Image (cartoon, rainbow, N blue to C red):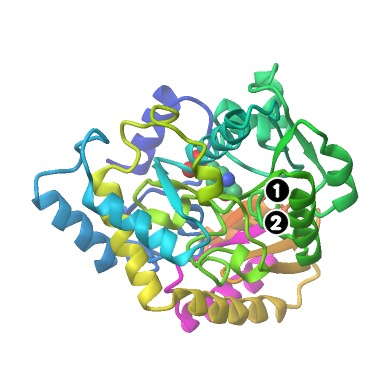
Amino acid sequence: MTLSEIQSLDRQHFLGVFGERLPVCFVRGEGCTLYDQEGRAYTDLFAGIAVNALGYNHPAVTGAILAQAQTGILHTSNLYYVQPQAELAALLCRHTFADRVFFSNSGAEANEGAIKLARKYFYAQGSGRYKIVSANHSFHGRTLATVAATGHEDYQEPYRPLLPDGLSQVPYNDFDALRAAVDEQTAAILLEPVQGEGGVIPGDPAYLKAVRALCDERGILLIFDEVQTGVCRTGSLYAYQQYDVIPDIMTSAKGLGCGFPIGAVLASERVASAIAIGDHGSTFGGNTLACAVSLSAMRYLIEHDFSSVAREKGAQLMALLRSISSPQIIDVRGMGMLLGVQLTQDCAAKDLVRALLARGFVAGTASGNVLRIAPPLILSAAQMEAFAKALDDALSGF
Ligand SMILES: *Cc1c(COP(=O)(O)O)cnc(C)c1O
């Protein structure tokens, strides 16, 4: 099929939520390189929205998919024991604050689980606490509860009245606003340690520490949404580890399956012990194939210390981006391999992404006119340098 044939089918039959996409269809990938139908190569610095941490066709991913497929079992359901699910849960508990894990199929679903867990925790104590406070410019997903938690008016407006009741937002990195927003009915505070979709805005370390202290003082649960920041992306397995602020509940997804859909809710025993049989569930969540792939990828990432890799490569990439002297760049920020380039109004991030694509480079955007860079963690120094050159060149066209 040609690109225009695919575009025509998409325009006719796919729900119009994505509109005109970038004019490319990738058909093959290897390492950090993607190939389109004409065989043209692109260097990927976006990893399918911070998902493909090990790039394309990595043996730890491809091999695990093939090996699991060859057993003939992709799925058996949670009616039975699932070995890679048990092993993956154990691995996540070993490497994080968590004592217990539940698997979902996406980041939004993981956040749904986190919200349910927080409410159940208070319900089990006979407490009426139910409110969840999150941040403006946050992103927590597209289900009804996670849209209500997402501080983005465009995503919420068509779906009012918002479900469930009791979700509100305050400005991010503003401790006084948060303190003023919590009350006796607040069950949890839900934050991204670094806001990804919102513009790659790192949480202020003093802010996150103060939030933890507020939660302790007021008996509120702290939920970190690490769907985007997790899995070595920011330079530690999860970003909270660098902030040294331990949440009560944490969610993970994106990089967790390195391309295979899987999400997770992680919780301390204190919180998890509120959950009883039948409180939550999933047909697909924690599926054999998903867990086998994630287990293999996570073992590889941890054994090869990809947290340090992301920290070092991220610092190199940040330095390269900061060395570009373009009047269109206002700021370069981020953590590890999650970087944002703040652009001036005359240089639209989405146009810059097109200009980069035309030069054979894949990057993304974030709110607030930010070029977002979240590469596979296996990106080479030469690929980073080539990207910085291409960006410099693309910017000179604005
Ligand atoms: C992408 C993202 C989500 C939603 O994940 P989906 O898999 O698209 O449901 C939630 N939270 C954060 C921080 C994200 O970046």
The image shows residue 66, relative to residue 75, as above or below, that is below
Q: Which amino acid type is shown beneath numbered disc 1?
A: Ser
Judge: label 2 CB < 8 Å from ligand 1: no
Where is residue 130 shown, x and y percent of the image? 68, 29
Q: Which mark is residue 367?
A: 1
Where is residue 160 shown, x and y percent of the image? 69, 18
Q: Is residue 56 visible?
A: no
Mark 1: give few (<14), some (14-19) or many (20+) Cα within 10 Å. Answer: some
In the image, 276 versus 223, the foreground residue is 276
220 on left or right of 257: right
| Residue that badge 2 annotates | 370
Q: Determine the quadrant in which ligand 1 lies.
A: top right
Q: Which amino acid type is shown beneath numbered disc 2?
A: Val
Mark 2: give few (<14), some (14-19) or many (20+) Cα within 10 Å. Answer: many
Indicate whether residue 377 is drawn in magenta.
yes
Write the start and end of the magenta stretch as one range.
Answer: 371-398
326 on left or right of 286: right
| Quadrant in the picture for residue 12 | top left
Element at label 2: strand
Where is residue 395 shown, x and y percent of the image? 69, 66
Q: Residue shown at 50%/50% (left/top)?
A: 269
**Quadrant assignment for the N terminus:** top left
User: Total of numbered circles in the picture?
Assistant: 2
215 on left or right of 271: right
Q: Is residue 285 visible?
A: yes
The answer to whether the residues at label 2 and label 1 have Cβ atoms under 8 Å apart is: yes
The image shows residue 307, relative to residue 261, as above or below, that is below
